[in-house]
Image (tube, helix red, strand yellow):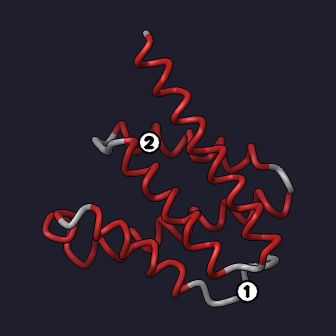
Amino acid sequence: MKNMTQDLTPLLEEIVTGIYQAYPNLLTKYGEVGKKKCLEDNQHHLDHLNLAYEAQNTQLFTDYVVWLDGVLTSRGMDTNHLILNLELIRDAVKQHLAIEQGVFYEKCLEEAVNRFESQKMIWLKG
C-alpha cells in the first residue's frame, strides 16, 4: 500500500497503550490476547484510513467507522470506546506520519467523531 510502508508499530502501540490506560479493566477482562487483538483492530483502522487517503475520499473512512460501530455495539461495546480509539489515532498520527498524510487522516477522524457527536445530539433531543 502506498504511504504505509513504514513501520507503524510505535504508532499502534501508542494507541493501544492509551486505550488500556483509559480502560484498565480490559487487561483483566481480555488479557494479552485482547491486547493483541486491539493492535490488529487498529491496524485495520489504519488500513481503512490509508484507502481513504489513496482515494482522497474521507467518506470511505466515515462509512467504515459507522459500519464498525454497528458491529461493535451489537456485541455489547459502547460507542464511546470507539470515539476514544479514533481520538487516540488522531493524536498518534500527528507524531508518526508525514504531514500531508497525517492531515488527511486527522480530517477523516474528525469527520467520523463529529458524525457520532451529531447523532448523540439527535438522540438527546429525541
Q: Amino acid at mark 1?
A: Thr
The answer to whether residue 120 is left or right of residue 63 is: left
Question: Of tags 1 and 2, which is closer to the observer?
Answer: 1
- Quarter of the figure that contains the C terminus: top left
Q: Secondary structure at mark 2?
A: helix
Which residue lies at the image location 43% right of the left edge and 55% below the top edge? 84
* Residue at the top extreme of this rendering: 126
- Badge 1 crowding class, 10 Å Cα cut-off, few under 14, some 14 to 19, many 20 or more, is few
Q: CB atoms at circles 1 and 2 under 8 Å apart?
A: no
Which residue lies at the image location 53% right of the left edge and 86% below the top edge? 9
The answer to whether residue 94 is left or right of residue 33 is: right
- Badge 2 crowding class, 10 Å Cα cut-off, few under 14, some 14 to 19, many 20 or more, is few
- State the separation of the CA atoms marked 1 and 2: 29 Å
In the rendered image, residue 15, in percent from the top left (x then y), is placed at: 45, 72
In the rendered image, residue 34, in percent from the top left (x then y), is placed at: 29, 70
In the rendered image, residue 28, in percent from the top left (x then y), is placed at: 13, 69
Q: Nearer the viewer, residue 30 or 100?
A: 100
Which residue lies at the image location 61% right of the left edge and 44% below the top edge? 112
Mark 1 or 2, nearer chain start: 1
Q: Amino acid at mark 2?
A: Val
**Mark carried by residue 71:** 2
Q: Nearer the viewer, residue 39 or 109?
A: 109
- Quarter of the figure that contains the N terminus: bottom right
Which residue lies at the image location 35% right of the left edge and 66% below the top edge? 19
Q: Where is 13 relative to 70, above or below?
A: below
Which corner quadrant of the image does residue 103 belong to?
A: bottom right
Q: Secondary structure at mark 1?
A: loop
**Mark carried by residue 5:** 1
In the rendered image, residue 67, in percent from the top left (x then y), is placed at: 55, 40
* Residue at the bottom extreme of this rendering: 7
Q: Where is 96 relative to 79, above or below?
A: below
The answer to whether residue 110 is left or right of residue 52 is: left
